[in-house]
Image (cartoon, rainbow, N blue to C red):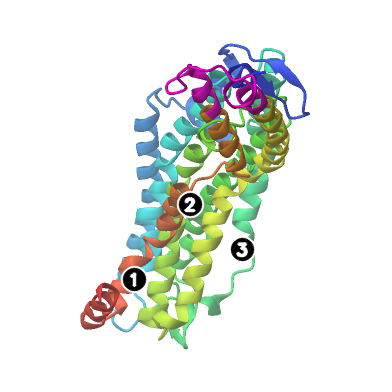
């Protein structure tokens, strides 16, 4: 069996072989969406939202910023806490709250458009690339339909809403003191009670932001579930595929788009770190472990769904090594008999002969199989996710680090 014949065959997840089918279409795959589904989205559509998803997302982002941040400004101004020098952290100087509601919140809303587009393309790619055969198409569609029904259930969103409000049920007023000095969360009249802005933050702004974050966690869980179930189908994998992932390399591009959510989380983290350095005598050295931990956890959590493909890729690689080994042995024996052994044909030019090309192709195919990755993840995606987590920290480092120290560090790196 030559290599061309082998590549026409499919490596199924159970080790069996079937002939590959042509590109398929699926209504469930065309309808698939992890963002534009669910009770809340359907409710907004019934309220008269337009079919332009970008304009709807912009409106939601502006509305949520107005609900979460603008009342805090008005209420803190009404009680003299917006820019009161007697308060350790007046509202307008609270970097964490401004970054959370004016930067991270709109990103969490607007990121849904590119993420949804990329994930839908990834789902369709299973069909366009012939990874899902006609025999497995009903199972593939049934999986997508189950995910859609799960998205449209109201219970998961009610649970997320309860979790988002749980920290507000037992508020600790002392959390809003820094070294015994009140922040804008505490009334400036000296009564020690919670301010109006503090109550709005506790009951409205903070729970809404947590709810948005939890919805992205839920979507990541659903995406992980999809990949886990798809990898249990009899997929048409090609071990010698140049993406070094048996044809699943497109999943790393899909996962890369979650860098937007990672960036939003990093922005909130940077605001908290900035407050610690500016108002709590925090230093870059004391907060560095926290920043490094966040970068590592955020990057790893973003690529965790790709681990669902690991068992299948391991089985595919192990089986392909034996397949290619057998093909290489048979081909080498035939090559030796024709060109080198006692029965070699004299006077025939080997240079440019198809036999030499097939020998090189088979050898390259075997090397490709040996270099297969056990996770459909490339280095660029991991770097993009790490940078998305780390980039929001850069302004904090610039703020707290003197310019002369930065210049000295740069010179050390270049020396």
Q: CA distance from mark 2 to mark 1?
A: 23 Å
**For the residues carrying marks 3 and 2, which lies nearer the camera in this image?**
2
Q: Quadrant of residue 279?
A: bottom left
Q: Which element type, helix, strand or loop, lies under badge 2?
A: helix
Pointer 2 local density, CA inside 10 Å: few below 14, some 14–19, many at least 20: some
Of mark 1 and mark 3, the one earlier in the sequence is: 3
The residue depicted at 69 percent of the width and 25 percent of the height is 330
Q: What is the distance, in whole Å, between disc 3 and disc 2 at their CAs? A: 33 Å
In which image quadrant can residue 124 be found? top right
Q: Is residue 342 visible?
A: yes
Residue under numbered circle 1: 396
User: Which residue position is annotated with label 3?
Assistant: 167
- Disc nearest the viewer among 2 and 1: 2
Between 38 and 237, the residue placed more toward the observer is 237
Q: Which mark is residue 382?
A: 2
From the viewer's perspective, is residue 383 above or below residue 345? below
How many neighbours does mark 1 have within 10 angstroms: few (below 14), some (14-19), or many (20 or more)?
some
Q: Earlier in the sequence, mark 3 or mark 2?
A: 3
Position of the N terminus by quadrant:
top right
Q: Going from the N terminus, do you reach mark 2 or mark 1 first? A: 2
Task: Tell me the mark number nearer the camera, choosing from 1 and 3.
Answer: 1
Percent across and percent down for residue 258 are 48, 45
341 falls in the magenta region = yes
Give how far apart the Cα atoms at labels 1 and 3 are.
Answer: 27 Å
Magenta-drawn segment: 331-359
Q: Nearer the viewer, residue 188 or 358?
A: 358
């Amino acid at each position: 069996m030559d290599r061309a014949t082998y590549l026409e065959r499919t490596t199924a997840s159970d080790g069996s072989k079937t002939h590959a089918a042509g590109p398929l279409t699926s209504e469930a795959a065309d309808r698939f969406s992890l963002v534009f589904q669910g009770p809340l989205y359907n409710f907004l559509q019934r309220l008269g939202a337009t079919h332009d998803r970008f304009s709807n997302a912009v409106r939601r982002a502006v509305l949520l910023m107005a609900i979460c941040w603008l009342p805090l400004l008005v209420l803190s101004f009404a009680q003299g806490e917006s820019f009161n020098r007697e308060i350790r952290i007046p509202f307008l100087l609270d970097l964490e709250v401004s970054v959370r509601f004016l930067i991270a919140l709109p990103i969490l809303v607007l990121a849904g458009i590119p993420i949804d587009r990329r994930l839908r393309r990834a789902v369709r790619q299973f069909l366009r690339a012939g990874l899902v055969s006609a025999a497995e198409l009903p199972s593939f569609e049934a999986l997508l339909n189950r995910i859609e029904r799960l998205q449209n259930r109201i219970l998961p969103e009610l649970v997320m809403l309860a979790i988002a409000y749980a920290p507000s049920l037992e508020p600790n007023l002392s959390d809003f003191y820094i070294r015994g000095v009140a922040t804008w969360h505490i009334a400036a009249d000296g009564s020690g009670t919670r301010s109006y802005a503090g109550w709005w933050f506790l009951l409205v702004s903070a729970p809404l932001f947590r709810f948005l974050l939890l919805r992205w966690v839920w979507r990541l869980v659903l995406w992980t579930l999809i990949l886990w179930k798809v990898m249990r189908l009899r997929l048409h994998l090609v071990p010698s595929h140049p993406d070094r992932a048996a044809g699943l390399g497109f999943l790393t591009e899909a996962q890369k788009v979650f860098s937007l959510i990672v960036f939003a989380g990093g922005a909130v983290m940077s605001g908290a770190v900035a407050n610690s350095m500016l108002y709590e005598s925090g230093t870059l050295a004391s907060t560095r472990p926290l920043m490094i931990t966040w970068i590592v956890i955020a990057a790893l959590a973003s690529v965790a769904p790709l681990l669902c493909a690991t068992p299948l890729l391991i089985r595919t690689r192990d089986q392909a090594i034996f397949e290619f080994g057998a093909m290489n042995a048979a081909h080498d024996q035939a090559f030796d008999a024709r060109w080198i052994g006692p029965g070699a044909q004299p006077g025939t030019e080997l240079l440019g002969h198809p036999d030499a090309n097939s020998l090189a192709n088979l050898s390259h195919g075997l090397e490709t199989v040996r270099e297969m990755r056990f996770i459909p993840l490339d280095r660029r995606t991991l770097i993009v996710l790490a940078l998305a987590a780390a980039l929001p920290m850069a302004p904090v480092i610039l703020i707290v680090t003197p310019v002369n120290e930065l210049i000295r560090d740069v010179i050390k790196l270049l020396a």
